Amino acid sequence: MSTLTTANETPEFLYATSGEIFRAESPFPGVEIAPTPISTKADVVSATAVARAAQLAWSQTSLKHRVVILNRYHDLVLEHQDELASIIQRETGKARAHAVEEVLQVAMISAYYAKNAKKLLTPSNRAGVLPVLTQVKVMPAPKGVVGIISPWNYPFTLSMCDILPAILVGNTVVLRPDEQTMWSAIRGLELLFEAGITSGVVTMVSGPGSTIGSGLIDQVDYVCFTGSTATGRIVGAQAGARLIGASLELGGKNPMIVCADANLNKFLDIATRACFTSAGQLCISIERMYIHESIYEKFLAAFVVRVRELILGAGVGWGYDVGSLVGPAQLSRVTEAVSKAVSQGAKIEAGGGHRPEIGPYVYEPTVLSGVTKVMEISTDEVFGPCVYVQPFKTIEQAIALANDSIFGLSASVITADTKLGKEIAVQLRTGSVNVNEGFASAYGSVDAPMGGMGASGLGRRHGIEGLLRFTQPQTIATAHVATLSPKLGLSEEQWSGILVKFLRIMKALRLR
Ligand code: NAD
């Protein structure tokens, strides 16, 4: 029996004094995860107070200093990639390749923000009320203390990829990771301290979302939440009541449109990755596939063969394609969604079975057909290894089907004609569209924003948008001649007349 960690000491940055512990269960047979201490609501207050006390000094360190830390973090993450991937695998049950992708994504984000920090955060000069005589700069001021509530499905990426830009702009952070995946977050923070952040720059709390997560929203100046749409609505309402900003990265029911001219082999590679990475427990994974009727039978038959060939596994290391679901709740969720669809008339083309002999929560990659609009599975996120396929006649119909969802996170278009792919893309109501990829080309392009339209959320991570959400614009206007009030003994009325003339001249000279 292997143990994730035997560390008995609570890390200094984790505020958890309840005396109670949480025992996460590894989805892998024979693997134990060391328990983690649980915070009290008072710990949330303390962790935020410490982060608040550290914020001013941190924001006054030079940007150069913070960039050095991000560059060091990049190197440390790559140095420890094997260890990190093992922790992620043990806590989430995902295949090694998908755990490594998490690690690489964090390294990419560190390097990207380190390289572009100066360019993205340079204060902008704006036109002053009196040209030359009033100088105006808009500064990207930090929000203060940012609360980050991260989920279990990408525990390392979705904690660190928000922490890094938040601290880069001078915020301090209180992180509340999901209880299932505490060690992925703890190890991520230990390396960040090793990279050079000082005490208080990031603190951590642990415990149930409904008490500790919610308690955190009551303390911070901005909240960054990743999770389901249902919880996102609660988080958004709570943030709204406090008049603090929130970025909400929520659920999806992501469509793929496969055009008549698509190449079969390319489709098979792309679709398999798009549907079954992290056993489908990925917000941007494809759950609906619309295939042109002229190629539908052929593509479906080949897809089913490919899906059945996927090697399932549940253990730390390489050697299999698709891992386990994270635990019993996810297994019930997927099993129930598929059984219900079948009871309503859907047909299982591939998979559809629980495989306890491989691992207690392993579920086969599943392809359904015959899904109709009345079935819940047609609209509700499964968040598991399950996709349904449906033929379409015209591109217009495919676009309408893809857009027929409350969600709008990610979409994919497969076609040999990239011009057509882009024409379809702009008609889709999703935050990202991948032409000739499933999700990786948009998600991996960290210079570009990533987030949802509609019920998939508010705000964006990655790129300049993912950085500026952690700032608030502050205008600093410096007057080089004092005040705009009457001068030279003029009356208010005479002064107003001068101002009217001044505005007319300015417009005529196109100076404003
Ligand atoms: P969830 O909403 O049930 O939980 C997410 C986190 O929020 C958990 O850690 C939970 O403990 C916490 N939480 C619960 N109630 C809370 C409250 N009242 N206040 C604060 N926090 C609270 O989601 P889940 O099922 O654990 O995660 C899967 C969902 O996350 C899927 O819908 C998936 O699409 C979505 N997701 C979205 C993205 C994205 O970038 N858009 C990324 C990953 C996952």
Image: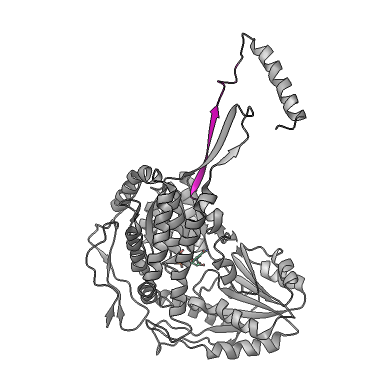
Q: Quarter-wise, where is residue 256 in the image?
A: bottom right
Total labels drawn: 0
How far from the left and from the top, in percent, is residue 337?
53, 77
Rendered image quadrant of residue 308: bottom right
Q: Position of residue 387 (x, y in %)?
A: 58, 79
Q: Is residue 472 inside the magenta stretch?
A: yes
Q: Residue at x 61, y 37 (%)?
A: 126
Query: Does 116 appear above or below 421?
Result: above
On-image quarter of the C terminus: top right
The colour scheme applied to this rendered structure is one colour
Residue 214: % across, % down: 40, 54
Comparing 191 with 185, the one in front is 191
Q: Is residue 128 magenta?
A: no
- Residue depicted at 40% across the width and 90% down the height: 357
Q: Which residues are magenta?
A: 470-485
> Does residue 454 appear in this view?
no
Q: x, y (%) of residue 283?
A: 52, 68
Q: Considering the image in quadrants, where does the N terminus appear?
A: bottom left
Say left or right for 306 vs 223.
right
Q: Residue at x 42, y 61 (%)?
A: 160
Outermost residue, top side: 489
Compared to residue 159, the image places residue 344 above or below, namely below
